Image (spheres, rainbow, N blue to C red):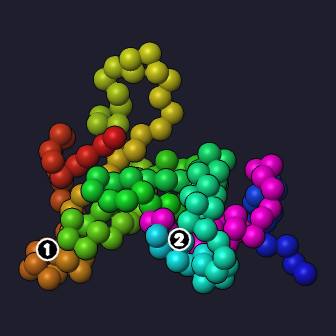
Amino acid sequence: MPISPYAELLRTADMRVTRPRVAVLEVVGSNPHADTDTILGLVRSVLPEVSRQTVYDVLNALTAARLVRRIEPAGSPARYESRVGDNHHHAVCRSCGVIADVDCAVGETPCLTASDSVGFTIDEAEVIYWGFCAQCSAARGQSTAPVSFPPGSRTQQSS
């Protein structure tokens, strides 16, 4: 029987391979930006006996091991993704809530350079771009052309 790439990923992270861990990794890998309830429902479709607490515990362990990334856009439950280690950002639709990955900013990025590191060694920046996805923009009769937001505006948030 071939070894699951998710089982191998767990072993590489020095984590014990369990059915719930493998199932959660599979679900997160197939459903980027899924919330906990969605992950729970999909895991239960293959492991009906798994408890909510087990899924929470697995997500916490996988996040701590940096096998999954937890994001928390304002007004949204925590979301999880398997794209880790590249410091990418996210765009969130204000209308339907869809979340898309956005690669790191290119060119001059003064908003991503801390004016004062306050003694921290900064190794990551998290940026959330807010706006309307192409479908919601079309439904509103808006252009889907890229928009430049002034620094500090409400349409651009960082945490």
Whichever of labels 1 and 2 marks the residue nearer the N terminus, that label is 2
| The image quarter in which residue 68 lies | bottom right
* Residue at the limit of the structure toward the top, as seen here: 119
Label 1 sits on what residue type?
Ser
Q: Which residue is mark 2?
A: 39
The reply to whether the magenta stretch includes residue 57 is: no
| The image quarter in which residue 27 lies | bottom right
> Relative to residue 16, is residue 143 depicted above or below?
below
| The image quarter in which residue 78 lies | bottom left
Disc 1 element:
loop
* Residue at the limit of the structure toward the right, as seen here: 1
Residue 102 shows in the view: no
Q: Which residues are magenta?
A: 13-36
Label 2 sits on what residue type?
Ile
Q: From the image, which quarter does the N terminus lie in?
A: bottom right
Across and down, in percent, residue 4 comes to: 79, 73
Looking at the image, which residue is at 80% across and 62% down? 17
Please tell me how many numbered marks the rendered image carries: 2
